[in-house]
Amino acid sequence: MRTLTLRGGVRVAVLAAEWHDAFAVVTRGRVQLELRDGEPGPVLGRDAGFWLRDTGVRALRNPGRRTARVRIVTPRNAE
């Protein structure tokens, strides 16, 4: 398990090789999913969980000013 910290306004690209089979949970703040076509996706709040596999998400963005945190679990590091 790892934690991704996103300061306000920060955007992090979702690379398929790094995020394959990843399940994520927002543990603090809000995170917006950016879709493959560049369109903004849903904004997820605390305790929202989401899969990244085959979802068309190309980035995670913090739309707020406060720091957001996302816990990420993948089969490689779930043990």
Image (tube, rainbow, N blue to C red):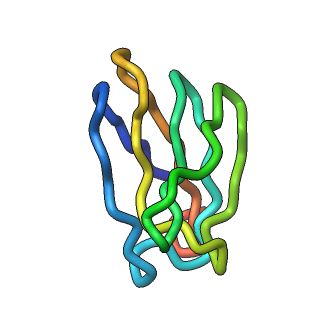
Q: Residue 52: percent from the left, percent from the top?
A: 61, 67
Q: Residue 21: percent from the left, percent from the top?
A: 62, 75
**Left or right, 31 with reference to 6:** right
Task: Please report the residue visible at 64 percent of the width from the left and 36 percent of the height from the top.
Answer: 44
- Work out whether residue 57 or residue 21 is closer to the camera in this orientation and state it: 57
Number of marks in the image? 0
22 in relation to 46, above or below: below
79 in relation to 76, above or below: above
Q: Residue 73: percent from the left, percent from the top?
A: 58, 58
Q: Quadrant of the C terminus?
A: bottom right
Q: Residue 55: percent from the left, percent from the top?
A: 65, 72
Task: Please report the residue visible at 44 percent of the width from the left and 51 percent of the height from the top.
Answer: 60
- Work out whether residue 42 or residue 71 is closer to the camera in this orientation and state it: 42
67 in relation to 52, above or below: above
Question: Is residue 36 visible in this depiction of the protein?
Answer: yes
**Left or right, 28 with reference to 66:** right
Task: Please report the residue visible at 34 percent of the width from the left and 17 percent of the height from the top.
Answer: 65
Asked where in the image residue 17 lies, by quadrant, the reply is bottom left
- Work out whether residue 21 or residue 34 is closer to the camera in this orientation and state it: 34
Asked where in the image residue 53 lies, by quadrant, the reply is bottom right
Q: As drawn, which residue projects farthest toward the top?
A: 66
46 in relation to 73, above or below: above
Question: Is residue 79 visible in this depiction of the protein?
Answer: no
Asked where in the image residue 56 lies, by quadrant, the reply is bottom right
